């Protein structure tokens, strides 16, 4: 009869990572705090540099820490944004001149930058959805609590929005849906498709993503009450920064 295997103690780098993780999740180490560096871990635990590096790598790979070249490794524990699919898109939100982001952030400061507006020829899949080869495109980046969390690219049929505020950098109160309403094209129905993938190089840079962090991609199409598609918005979200909430009746 064979003996039951005796559980092995985790390797030292795992035990160090477990200790640091506990300090992060307990709130002792907070978002933006610098973790003990390799030299400090070597001195505290009498370990080799490679072992200290392994311990920090565990937290980096889990998305709890991010390295900054020449500076060290820092805690990356962001309070997630709760994105409520229907509440943020309700007419009472944008129809009263409020940004749909106010429904997500609930008083947390947010900013929009890297805004680009251009008239372009639509990619084939975009043209098929919007029934328009020529589109106006709005690209921008959103940050919450000074951290980039989302990239968004909206496409509008050029024939519907030509010469309107949608083609300007400053969109005004209520955002694009309020401006579509000004044109007699208020959105009445939305469809969202959600998927996950690894980020492309530019997305990693723009969102400041540590290696191994996936993104959530949401494609939303807005339709008028008559079924006319008026916007297709592709959003790329830092997966570590979001909770997606959808409510359904049984």
Image (tube, rainbow, N blue to C red):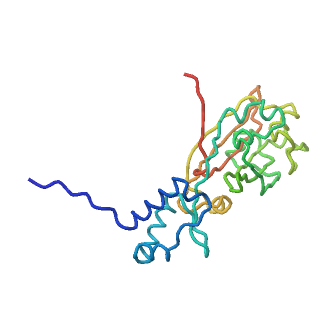
Q: Nearer the viewer, residue 158 or 38?
A: 38
Q: Nearer the viewer, residue 237 or 59?
A: 59
How many numbered discs, if any? Answer: 0
Q: Tell me if 224 is positioned left or right of 194 in this view.
A: right
Locate residue 214, reporting x and y percent: 55, 54
Q: Residue at x 65, y 42 (%)?
A: 219
Locate residue 161, reporting x and y percent: 85, 41
Q: Residue at x 58, y 55 (%)?
A: 77
Q: Tell me if 153 is positioned left or right of 79 in this view.
A: right
Q: Tell me if 225 is positioned left or right of 23 in this view.
A: right
Locate residue 223, reporting x and y percent: 74, 32
- Residue 159, placed above or below residue 53: above
In the figure, residue 30 lies in which quadrant? bottom right
Q: Residue at x 40, y 76 (%)?
A: 46
- Residue 99, placed above or below residue 202: above
Quarter holding the C terminus is: top right
Locate residue 73, reporting x and y percent: 56, 68
Q: Nearer the viewer, residue 86 or 137?
A: 86
Which residue ends up furthest to the top in the rendered image?
250
Which residue ends up furthest to the left in the rendered image?
1
- Residue 158, placed above or below residue 23: above
Q: Tell me if 115 is positioned left or right of 26 in this view.
A: right
């Amino acid at each position: 009869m064979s003996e039951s295997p005796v559980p092995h103690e985790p390797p030292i780098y795992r035990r160090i990572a477990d200790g640091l993780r506990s300090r992060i999740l307990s709130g002792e180490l907070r978002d933006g705090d610098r973790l003990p560096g390799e030299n400090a871990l070597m001195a505290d635990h009498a370990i080799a540099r490679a072992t200290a590096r392994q311990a920090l790598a565990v937290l980096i790979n889990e998305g709890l820490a991010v390295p900054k070249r020449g500076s060290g490794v820092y805690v990356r524990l962001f309070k997630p944004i709760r994105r409520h699919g229907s509440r943020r898109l309700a007419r009472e939100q944008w129809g009263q001149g409020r940004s749909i982001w106010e429904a997500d952030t609930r008083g947390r400061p947010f900013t929009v930058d890297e805004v680009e507006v251009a008239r372009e020829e639509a990619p084939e899949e975009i043209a098929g959805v919007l029934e328009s080869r020529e589109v106006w495109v709005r690209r921008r980046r959103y940050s919450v609590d000074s951290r980039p969390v989302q990239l968004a690219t909206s496409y509008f049929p050029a024939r519907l929005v030509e010469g309107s505020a949608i083609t300007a950098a400053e969109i005004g109160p209520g955002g694009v849906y309020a401006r579509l309403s000004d044109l007699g094209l208020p959105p009445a129905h939305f469809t969202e498709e959600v998927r996950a993938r690894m980020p492309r190089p530019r997305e990693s840079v723009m969102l400041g993503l540590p290696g191994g962090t996936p993104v959530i991609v949401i494609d939303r199409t807005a339709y008028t009450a008559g079924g006319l598609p008026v916007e297709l918005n592709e959003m790329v979200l830092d997966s570590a920064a979001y909770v997606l909430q959808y409510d359904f009746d049984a």
